[in-house]
Amino acid sequence: MYTCGPTVYDYAHIGNLSAYIYADTLRRHLEYSGYEVRQIVNITDVGHLTADDLNQADSGQDKMLKASLREKKTPEEIARYYTKCFFADVKKLNIEKAHYYPRATAHIPQMIKMMEALFEKGLAYEKNGNVFYDVTKFKEYGKLSKKKIDELRCGARLDDHPDKKHSYDFALWLKAPKKHLLKWKSPWSFGYPGWHIECSAMAIEYLGETLDIHSGGEDHIFPHHENEIAQSEGVTGKPFSNLWFHNRFLLVNGKKMSKSENNFYTLKDITDKKYDPMVFRLLVLGSHYRSNLNFTWKRMDEARKNYEKITRFIKKLTEISSLSLSTEGGKNVDLTRFLQEFEDAMNNDLNTPLALSVFYDLISKMNKNIIDQKLAPEKAREILAILEKMNKVFGMKIELKTRSIPKVIFDLLKKREQARSKKKYKEADKIRLEIENKGFIVEDTPDGQKVRIKELLPS
Ligand code: AMP
Ligand code: ZN
């Protein structure tokens, strides 16, 4: 699985982070379903001019260069700092680490090799040290985005690069102007790679010529992924990716959250407002990856309520699961249906909102049993195990302690019961202390002794 990663010139906004949460949920669900997943997420640490790509509203200024002028740092320092910030966000959101995070600047030789292969196939041309992909030579160009070259021709921008044959061709390599800080030697010029070539080169380097899954946000369908296909399939002649996974945009006030619109929030904005990062994860999961999520703080409040409901329930369940009392409560409730419904929802195009509703349904049904004080500890343990299974896919950082009571405690309880029946109260107290020292509390109730884990007692 190849996931297009961040361009590390600034903090990621929560729209970007939602893309990684969805990809992570897909990966987690595949792992849950028994697949072994190898995930590669690239780090774009080389600035790319974006004006040579069609349909990009950007100014064409190199993002890394812009950032290094803004912050008076070298591009390497900028990249190092924002990569670190990206990893910190990934950790806070409990996104599973990719197996490898290749950096674009460390793969220039692979990109050059690929471009040479494109020349051999007659798909690339050079002028004045700049190299472009000749889109007209790749018959299947547009197959992912369903765009036709004729349409691109109409939409082409006039201010395109003067060395291009066709305005819809895209850059593979650009000759660096004097002030450009990051540049490499190549057969064509001292320059730097276009954006798309890095993903083709790194995906093939680490995952082979055909990937199972390639993910990214919807803006990547065109031109980025269309161009990745043209490059990769142009060289290998094999399908580049069997499946494409694109998430819809996260919006603010109905508009795409983006740096250029200046309508973005970072994860820090969320934690500064005292929301747990898991609340954001839950908000994202509550919206299907193929529909737009309109971000509002009101929705964050609703997500927080749900998150608290989940954690409260799990805490209660953990308490009950450590009781030694035997009751029959909830024993007839069939729990397998919940897991089945959850799996059906996830298998149906990763329907996380529906899967979450199964999770909530289980909580409210079982909460009723708890309120009626009928839930049997064994049942509580069974529910915990199910929630834990589901949560492997949801990926929320919740302590699901299913610590059961060890046999040694039951043995001590038996001894204490015997001592009490013989009215040896001193000995019984000694045993109580011994139990306490092992981290458990004994209560004497009309139903007999009741034991629970010490730290879970209300303070
Ligand atoms: P970038 O760092 O700009 O390459 O973006 C990183 C990832 O975030 C890419 O997969 C983008 O498609 C995705 N992305 C960018 N903006 C949004 C947004 N508003 N909502 C969801 N995903 C986004
Ligand atoms: Zn990419």
Image (tube, grey):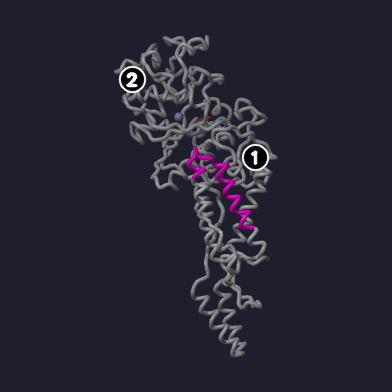
Mark 2, secondary structure of its residue: helix
Q: Relative to 453, is 190 on the left or the right?
A: left
Quarter of the image for residue 100 reads top left
Q: What residue lies at 36% left-to-right and 36% top-to-bottom? A: 207
Quarter of the image for residue 366 reads bottom right
Q: Residue furthest front?
A: 332
Q: From what the image shows, is residue 406 above or below residue 12?
A: below
Taking depth in this image into account, of 417 and 298 the one nearest to the observer is 417
Span highlighted in magenta in the image: 344-367
Q: How many marks?
A: 2
- Indicate whether residue 250 is drawn in magenta: no
Q: Position of residue 277 (x, y in %)?
A: 60, 45
Taking depth in this image into account, of 98 and 75 the one nearest to the observer is 98
- Of the image marks 2 and 1, the number of the one nearer the N terminus: 2
Taking depth in this image into account, of 445 and 271 the one nearest to the observer is 445
Q: Position of residue 175 (x, y in %)?
A: 42, 17
The residue at which mark 2 appears reads as 118
Q: From what the image shows, is residue 89 above or below residue 330?
A: above
Cα gap from disc 2 to disc 1, whole angstroms: 45 Å
Q: Amino acid at mark 1?
A: Asp
Mark number for residue 269?
1
Quarter of the image for residue 427 reads bottom right
Q: Position of residue 49 (x, y in %)?
A: 49, 21
Quarter of the image where ligand 2 sits: top left
Q: Amino acid at mark 2?
A: Leu
Q: From what the image shows, is residue 411 above or below residue 172?
A: below
